[in-house]
Image (cartoon, rainbow, N blue to C red):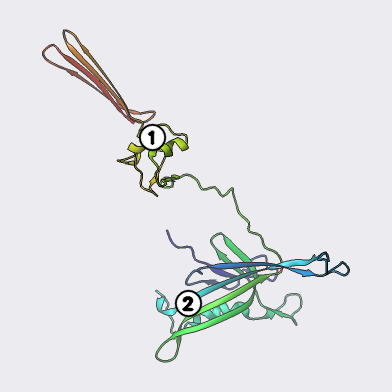
Amino acid sequence: MSLEKAHLYELDQSLANEKPDGRRVEVQFNPETLKVTFANQIVQPQGGDQAAGNAGRQFVGAGTTKLALQLWFDVTAMEKDAVDDVRRITRDVTYFMTPQPSDQDPKKLAPPGVRFHWGSFLFDGMVEGMEESLEFFSKDGKPLRSSITLTLSQQKILSAEFKGDGKVPNQPGQAPLKSAKQGDSLQTMAGKNGKSDWQGIASANGIEDPLRMAPGQLVDLNLSAGASVGVGVSAGAGTAIGVGIGFGEGASNTSSVGLNASLGGSVGGSVSFG
């Protein structure tokens, strides 16, 4: 499974859709953190008793949302199409700071819209500020590494949108596990979770000492071997022994074994494995 990379996409001037022929930049290293800031403009209305603290503040405007992040670029880590100066890569990011003529009024300039997209995180806005630090220079004075701090803003309060209910489906290898606490036994853990077959749970989880659980030990309480053994013995002129063993619920594979013993004895057995 490949690592999801963050991207910067150029938006049209409505800041709603990607520009068909716009600039697209794949970041070299994903950011470590994303800082989202929400702000509203608040003004002090006329009137009211300010000394008493009841001036009655009110909100004005739709507010702003800002995203701050840091990106790293390093030409020495490039596996293909390597270049000799890191600025040859970062100029694609600087592009989003470059003013362009407005569609409505060519005399007015504004930076292009940009969309930061990383996995399920999406932010549409404009680059408000950018700071680039150049470091790790070659012997001829060319910078090989760069860190860029970007601040994106949007003139409204942006809310995250999600698809589906967000519940993680149960898949193999993702069973919910319970962690044992200090002094727990498997019997007490099973009882707290409404499970009575603690012996079967111990067998299914491979727990050798269910009475003394190590703190932090993980147990799947939904897993149970459900073993049952029945033995019947009768003695007479001949000896007959019947043994039945069943594991699990709803066993589908069944093997039957019939044995005849000499010396007037007979033995019959059946074994079922789930």
Left or right: 139, with 109 as reference point: left
Q: Is residue 208 above or below residue 155?
A: above
Left or right: 128, with 204 as reference point: right
Query: Residue 112's image quarter?
Result: bottom right
Indicate the position of residue 65 as horizontal and vertical percent values. 67, 67
Indicate the position of residue 127 as horizontal and vertical percent values. 63, 75
Callout 2: helix, strand or loop?
strand
Please name the residue shown 67% across and 63% down the image.
158
Please name the residue shown 39% across and 32% down the image.
197
* Viewer-nearest of discs 1 and 2: 1
Q: Is residue 251 above or below residue 84?
A: above
- Measure the C-alpha gap from mark 1 to mark 2: 55 Å
Q: Residues within 10 Å of mark 2 (few under 14, many from 20)?
A: many
Foreground pick, 197 / 267: 197
Indicate the position of residue 134 as horizontal and vertical percent values. 49, 84
Whether residues under marks 1 and 2 lie with C-beta atoms below 8 angstroms apart, the answer is: no
Foreground pick, 233 / 267: 233
The residue that label 2 is drawn on is 73
Query: Residue 80's image quarter?
Result: bottom left
The residue that label 1 is drawn on is 198
Indicate the position of residue 144 as horizontal and vertical percent values. 44, 83
Label of residue 40 in the image: none
Q: Is residue 173 above or below residue 128?
A: above
Q: Quadrant of the N terminus?
A: bottom left
In the image, farthest residue toward the left: 263
